[in-house]
Image (cartoon, grey):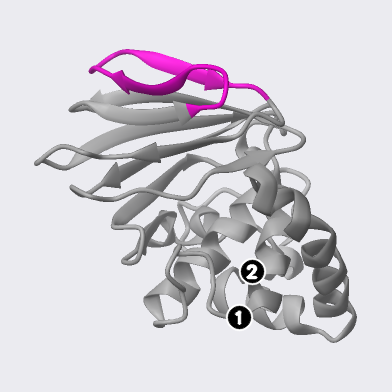
Amino acid sequence: MPAETRLPVDVKPKHIATVPPGITNPERRHIRNPVQKNWATVQKYGRETNGAYGVGVTSVAPGGKNDGHFHGSYSETFTSLKGNVGIYTKSRGRIILKEGESATVPPREEHYWFNDGDEEVEIEVKIEPAMEGFEKGLYVMYGLAQDGKGGNAGVANSIVDTAIICSMADMWPGGVIGTTLIPLLKSLAWVGRKTGKEDKLLKKYWA
């Protein structure tokens, strides 16, 4: 461990493998999803804010987007840092955030981000309260995409992997399709935990 690295006070050296990877290796704060055409940099893990919030910056290439989804237990605030950032929320529809403008999506509201322009955009994303499961799910999702297992929507080719990510991150598909799929995803996530698949994904992409 580099001498300048400082672990949170509640983390002992023997537990280093379980803490957010960027805390012990700053290079691992940067992750990339080639399917969704974006990269992300974690600025603050929940471990670094006593669980109050988490903050990251994501860059979205022209044509990049994610699918409509919602989070059950935390809000997301999107702020444009560069360019015109597209945000859809169920209550507001499609809106464009100019540099410096923000939009907050409360828990359980369907939303997604997109870039319809010709240039790369950058978004600050703040979740409140922080959720380590969201951070873990993001690393697993981006890691699978890097390995060519990201699926058309950038989540996962495997429905069991998708279920694990959704459950871990409290990130669920929206709309009528989501209403139908969520019970199945929760059941498959349980199977993934019981069979050790979740642990394998975390050891490969998080630990």
Task: Give the image location of residue 13, x and y in percent.
Answer: 70, 64
**Disc sitting over residue 124 in the figure:** none
Left or right: residue 195 compared with residue 158: right
Residue 48, quarter of the rendered image: top right
Q: Which residue is mark 2?
A: 162
Q: Which residue is mark 1?
A: 158
Query: Mark 2 and mark 1: span between their CA atoms?
Result: 6 Å
Task: Give the image location of residue 67, x and y in percent.
Answer: 48, 50
Task: Give the image location of residue 41, x and y in percent.
Answer: 38, 47
The residue sitting at 63% across, 59% down in the picture is 136
Per the image, label 2 sits on a secondary structure element best described as helix
Q: How many marks?
A: 2
Of the pair 2 and 21, the residue shown nearer to us? 21
Of the pair 51 and 71, the residue shown nearer to us? 71
The residue sitting at 65% across, 29% down in the picture is 109
Are dots 2 and 1 in contact, CB under 8 Å? yes
Amino acid type of the residue that numbered disc 1 sits on in the rendered structure = Ser
Residue 163, above or below 79: below
Task: Judge the density around disc 2: few (<14), some (14-19), many (≥20) Cα neighbours within 10 Å.
Answer: many
Left or right: residue 187 compared with residue 163: right
Viewer can see residue 20: no
Residue 32, above or below 69: below
Q: Which residues are magenta?
A: 89-106
Residue 108 shown in magenta: no
Residue 45, above or below 28: above
Task: Give the image location of residue 124, x and y in percent.
Answer: 39, 31
Q: Give the farthest residue toward the top.
A: 101
Of the pair 68 and 31, the residue shown nearer to us? 68
Residue 106, above or below 63: above
Viewer can see residue 206: yes
Q: Give the farthest residue toward the left.
A: 118
